């Protein structure tokens, strides 16, 4: 065997720390820290500062104010058809623009005489 291998083989194995003792010590220190914090004179808690709460504007008489009513309803068939047609035109337009920029535009040559 080489001398380094013999030195490593004859060296004692490193001792593992005693985790249980370390755990007990940490627990004891934590308990002492908590009890010392509790035994210290408690600080008086100051009342919170009052926050600014904006007041709502005074109510406007109903005679001068317009009545707005919001009514929710389903779309009618013509409205649905119009939305469908607009969506189809938008998709087709995007496809045409994409085709033009990727296929046709690179083929265009500018010749100077």
Image (cartoon, rainbow, N blue to C red):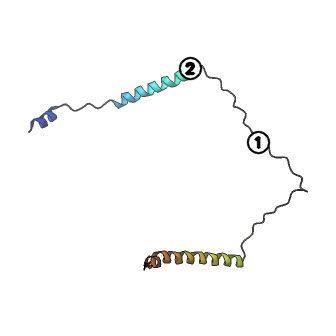
- Give the class, few, some or many, for how many residues have Cα within 10 Å of label 1's Cα (few <14, many ≥20): few
Up/down of 5 relative to 85, above or below: above
Corner quadrant of residue 52: top right
The quarter of the rendered structure image containing the N terminus is: top left
Separation (CA) of disc 1 from disc 2: 43 Å
Circle 1/circle 2 CB separation < 8 Å: no
Corner quadrant of residue 73: bottom right
Q: Position of residue 81 (x, y in %)?
A: 67, 79
Up/down of 14 relative to 59, above or below: above
Q: Position of residue 26 (x, y in %)?
A: 42, 27
Residue hosting label 2:
39
| Left or right position of 112 against 87 | left
The quarter of the rendered structure image containing the C terminus is: bottom left
Q: Which residue is found at the position 53% from the left and 78% from the top?
A: 96
Residue hosting label 1:
54
Q: Which residue is found at the position 48% from the left and 25% from the top?
A: 31
Up/down of 20 relative to 87, above or below: above
Residue at the far front in the pictured view? 113
Q: Position of residue 14 (x, y in %)?
A: 24, 32
| Sequence-first disc among 1 and 2 | 2
Q: Which residue is found at the position 75% from the left and 66% from the top?
A: 72
């Amino acid at each position: 065997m080489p001398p380094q291998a013999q030195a490593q083989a004859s060296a004692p194995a490193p001792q593992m720390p005693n985790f249980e003792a370390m755990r007990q010590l940490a627990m004891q220190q934590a308990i002492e820290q908590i009890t010392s914090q509790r035994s210290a004179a408690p600080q008086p808690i100051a009342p919170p500062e009052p926050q600014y709460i904006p007041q709502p504007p005074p109510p406007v008489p109903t005679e001068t104010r317009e009545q707005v009513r919001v009514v929710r309803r389903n779309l009618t068939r013509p409205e649905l058809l119009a939305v469908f047609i607009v969506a189809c035109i938008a998709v087709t337009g995007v496809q045409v623009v994409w085709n033009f920029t990727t296929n046709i535009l690179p083929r265009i040559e500018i010749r100077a005489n």
